[in-house]
Amino acid sequence: MVNGDVLMRIDEAGRVAEWSRSAQEAFGWSADEAVGRSVAVLVGEAAAGEQGRRDRIGTDVRMLVRPVLTGTSVLWEVRAATDATSGQDLAILRTVFTQAPLGLLVLDDQLRIVRVNMMARDLRGAPAIDLVGRVFTEVYELEDPAAEEAAARRVLDSGQPDLNRLVRGALGPSRPPLVYSVSYVRLEDERGQVIGVVASGADVTDRERALHRLNVLSEVRTRVGERLDVIATCEEMVETVVPAFCGIAVVEVIEDVVRGEDPPIVPVDRDVPLRRAAFKGLMSAYPVGDIRHLPYGTPFSRVLTDPRPRLVSLEGDSVWLAADLPRADAIKGSGAHSLIVAPLVLRGKALGLISFYRHRDEEPFQEEDISLASDMCAHAALCIDNARRYARERTIAATVQRRLLPPRPQALSTVDTSHLHLPSPDGGGAWFDAIPLSGARTALIVGDVAGRGMAAATTMGQLRTVIHSLAALDLEPDELMAQLDDTAIRLAAERSALPPGDPLHREPLTAGCLIAVYDPVDLTCTIVSAGLPEPVVVFPDGTSAILSVPTGPLLAGNGGNAPFPATTVSVPEGCTLAISTAALARKLLEPNAPLRRLLEENQDRPLAELCDLISYTLTNSSESDETLLLLAHVQALPSDQVLTCPLPDGPEAASLARAEVRSRLRTWNLEEETVFTTELIASELVGNAVRYGAPPLELRLIRDQVLTCEVTDGATSAPHIRHARTVDETGRGLFIIASLADHWGTRYQANGKTVWAQQPAESAETSSHAR
């Protein structure tokens, strides 16, 4: 007898159906004697038979038994296993098949069930006799039986196992769907012949549900909070949970939170309004953006009083629905049957709530889903609060910036200005100024601090204050920019000295600035730039050009070593200067850019209208950076409002100056008090220049919004006020000037200096009308 030989086949009643020669040799019964008899009787008689018969057998016979399908009946095939290893294999197989925590199916080559273990019967809930002989996909209710039959057939044909397939069961609407982990392995005999497939399956429904919950929570933590905006964060939330967690989701946020204000403490008063911030699903009770109080006596109002999530069944009559009829209609219309409403609470303060609905064929929520909803809402609450804080900071930064900018352009006689300011959503540090200077000049300034938020706004305010202070000193534009750079370097050093944990420590301070000083008498513009693009000038005939100006480094960007060269260009009367931040450089500097053409084609329009036109062209732009454009239309100071008189460098210069002043002021019809005061100021200025200055000397009177008296000489020595004693005969000149004039100062040129003094320029008629 050979190991593996077929001994016999037994029918379902336990009678021998087939008896082989090997069985005859092993047990001593012939086929005629054995077929049709009970196998238990035959084997028992063989065991108790004659000694000679046992000697012929020679050893104990070990047998392997397996079921075999023949037509519609099952026969049990018995094979010989004569070695110890086969016995051990049998014990192992018996243990695995009877005690394994997996459902095991033995399938023949037609994928019909020939044997099942206890776990497999439990998965189906039917006795083995109802399972054997049927194709396994007919026995087990699967979501896609054709796919599973094809997978088993591939294993049967190729011999390549297919392991750990996730298969969903289809148990009908009244029963929750199950998920199985199924593996297919081809079954071969000891001669390598294919005899079927072994299919194993385990119920992994709980595991897969837990993994799905973890995946949903991971997606929420990854996708929600990408944008620092309250409404956008709510939209991210509903987009993430639908349909992964529920079929309908509604986020309602307390209105104060949307505006960036502090959220109320739990419990929330019933009169606090909430805004429907985001919705995704079939039907909404209220439109997104709707603001209303939550109806009292509903789960939604309860979670803001007692901040814990609620699992609510919507099937049957719910008394609380009568308190919110629009919501009840929406629930009915969408087929919602299960609800989890969870609060958005952070550190004891309420930000709102989220309602999760499952509807139609979706599985109702379970108790395990409540903890997931709580975790998702905890993350959403943190993100919403971050967005709220950012919105508040952004509002404060925008307010600070708006307060620090000039509220309206200052009225100037020779320069008409208008500006276009499009702040970024996060606020910024762009600013502009039009500062009147001595000699009827005007300083046009545009600056831009790098960064956003409060830090950029406050730094802008500091630099703008410094510019105004330096402009009062009558510094030349290049010297003013150098002093401004020194200030920016000190501010940057203070920022870098902050503790490493301070967010401002990691933000380097840099800023761009352009200063253009327009002189309406000489019709020139002296320009110096620190990192900002060159200005564009539009001429009265509609043509334009770029004012070529050497661009210096950004403020605080070079350590204070690089110079800021100034360039003086001629600017004809009637021109318009356009000075912008870097965000508009490409649209302004390119010759055929739409913005450049717009300036050329609308040269005659009022500047305010021109700014509106420009803003319309930028509305659809994708630029997110802060945009600032300053337009300045320049005019010449009429020649009859300026007196220029060269003076000798001797003592007679003072009397000549007084005569010229008296004559011109009377021509301008200024009152006598102004004439007398100006004569005295001119006399003292000329006397000071003759005594301490150097030739050539020049007197200039300018009547603009103020009356300016200037004396220029070739010396660079700085004049200063002396408080002369009673016995001193000199030293009172500048003291007298400071007493009589509203303002006075000194500005320096490459070949000398100019000392000036300003007074009101009221005519005699204006003064009499005022009296």
Image: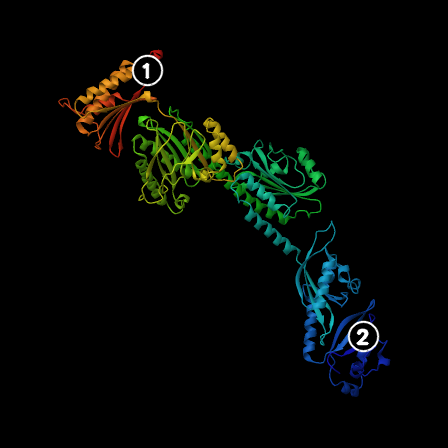
Q: Position of residue 435 (x, y in %)?
A: 36, 29
Disc 1 crowd rating (10 Å Cα; few below 14, some 14-19, many 20+) is some
Q: Position of residue 283 (x, y in %)?
A: 67, 38
- The one nearer the camera, 395 or 693, is 693
As drawn, the residue found furthest toward the left would be: 727
In the image: residue 63, left or right of residue 312: right
Q: Is residue 722 visible?
A: no
Q: Mark 2 falls on what kind of element?
A: strand
* Residue assigned mark 2: 9
Residue type at mark 2: give it: Arg
Circle number at residue 444: none
Q: Where 18 sits versus 384, above or below?
A: below
Q: Position of residue 164 (x, y in %)?
A: 65, 62
Circle number at residue 763: 1
Count of marks overlaid on the render: 2
Separation of marks 1 and 2 at Cα, in angstroms: 135 Å
- Which quadrant of the figure contains the C terminus? top left
In the image: residue 50, left or right of residue 659: right
Residue 770, quarter of picture: top left
In the image: residue 499, left or right of residue 214: left
- The one nearer the camera, 495 or 434, is 434
Q: Is residue 767 visible?
A: yes
Q: Where 24 sits versus 726, above or below?
A: below
